[in-house]
Amino acid sequence: MHSAEELREELCKRGLESGGTPSEMQERLLSALLAEDREASSGGGQSTAKRARTASSGSGGTAVRRKPKVFTFNDAVHGHIALPAVCVAVMDTPQFQRLKDLKQLGGVYYAYSCASHNRFEHSIGTAFLGGKLASRLRDIQPELGITDADVLCVQLAGLCHDLGHGPCSHMFEHFLESAWTANGHGEPPTHEYLSTQLLDYLIKDNDLMGVFEESGLTQRDITFIKEMIDHPVGPDGKALLPTGRDADKHWLAQIISNERCGIDVDKFDYFMRDARQLGIACGFDPYRLMLFTRVMRAPEDDVDKGQRVLVFKESEAWNIYELFHARCALSFSAQ
């Protein structure tokens, strides 16, 4: 990005106003470049998209780049949170907006009138926590090689992990199971599997592949997002390793849905959110636990021997106990 002085110089060259903040000056310069592109389009000039992305300066040859847009939301549980533009593009689709009509706790709302929160806000919270943990691990463990695309995949998996829920959330699964069995269809699909199918449909129906590509994501990344939501299983029922990432990054899937130990950001969010709405005390502190989360290789006597897995500091045992205590309290409240 240009300095303020370089931006003023570029604007002065074009006879444009050079006052204001650096952001305002950058927007003004980009608008001028777009206008120049339109004028030069018939003469084989640079494409609008390319010139809007980069513009060489006369002195240093550096580039002016439009920063990826980040949108801020004020969440009742986590406060102000930020999500990238690709997440907001997904949120703005009819398939995702329907989550506003799905009660997080299903029929519990009829007993606890304040339990009126929905899958929409829980999904946003899970995306935020997933991105927060992935970004922190990238900062403190650079040897893991976590990329921006990895963080985006984790955020999108957290955002879309509940797309497949039906009316009344988990209650719908019992209805689906009865209807499925009664019609001789065998085992009904899980809401995780339905979430992956809806994600594919959402991208196609709203023509979002271009938005994903602009964010640096490929079809393989989308495959990994789906594998984080619904872990692949072989014909024999045994878990398969994800194909969307190399072996040393399979642990990323544990951030959203941790089948190894059940400790993941999906639970972090809904424990806090459900307890808040039900008026139940929750002693679990997810932010502290994330501070003491690391990635290490499992020992030889472990079922995941040699693989990288999420681990937690031993002194956090009490906090993890509170996590499962909160789960127990919420389970009794829902009965």
Image (spheres, rainbow, N blue to C red):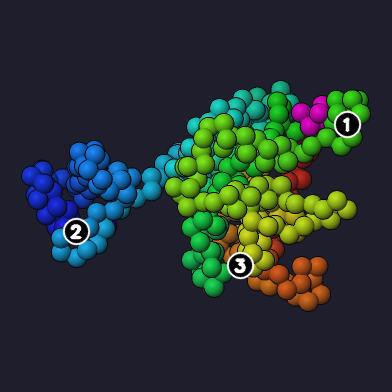
Indicate the position of residue 237 as horizontal and vertical percent values. Answer: 86, 52
- Can you name the residue that lies furthest to the bottom here? 300
Residue 277, image quadrant: top right
Indicate the position of residue 279 as horizontal and vertical percent values. Answer: 64, 36
Mark 1 residue element: loop
Q: Start and end of the magenta stretch?
A: 172-176
Q: Residue at x 19, y 59 (%)?
A: 57
Would you call the spot at circle 3 few (<14 residues within 10 Å), some (14-19), or many (20 or more)?
some
Q: CA distance from mark 2 to mark 1?
A: 64 Å
Residue 125, image quadrant: top right
Q: CA distance from mark 2 to mark 3?
A: 43 Å
Asked whether the viewer can see residue 85, the reply is yes
Q: Residue at x 66, y 51 (%)?
A: 228
Residue 202 forms part of the magenta stretch: no
Residue 174 forms part of the magenta stretch: yes
Please name whichever residue, 62 or 279, is drawn nearer the observer in this view of the structure.
62
Task: Answer with mark 2 or mark 3, whichever residue precedes in sequence.
Answer: 2
Label 1 sits on what residue type?
His
Would you call the spot at circle 2 few (<14 residues within 10 Å), some (14-19), or many (20 or more)?
some
Question: Residue beneath label 3, please?
Answer: 294
Please name whichever residue, 124 or 319, is drawn nearer the observer in this view of the structure.
124
Q: Is residue 180 left or right of residue 44?
A: right
Q: Quadrant of the C terminus?
A: top right
Residue 17 is tagged as: none
Indicate the position of residue 14 as horizontal and vertical percent values. Answer: 11, 46
Question: Residue beneath label 2, please?
Answer: 57
Indicate the position of residue 298 as horizontal and vertical percent values. Answer: 72, 72
Label 3 sits on what residue type?
Arg
Residue 185 is tagged as: 1
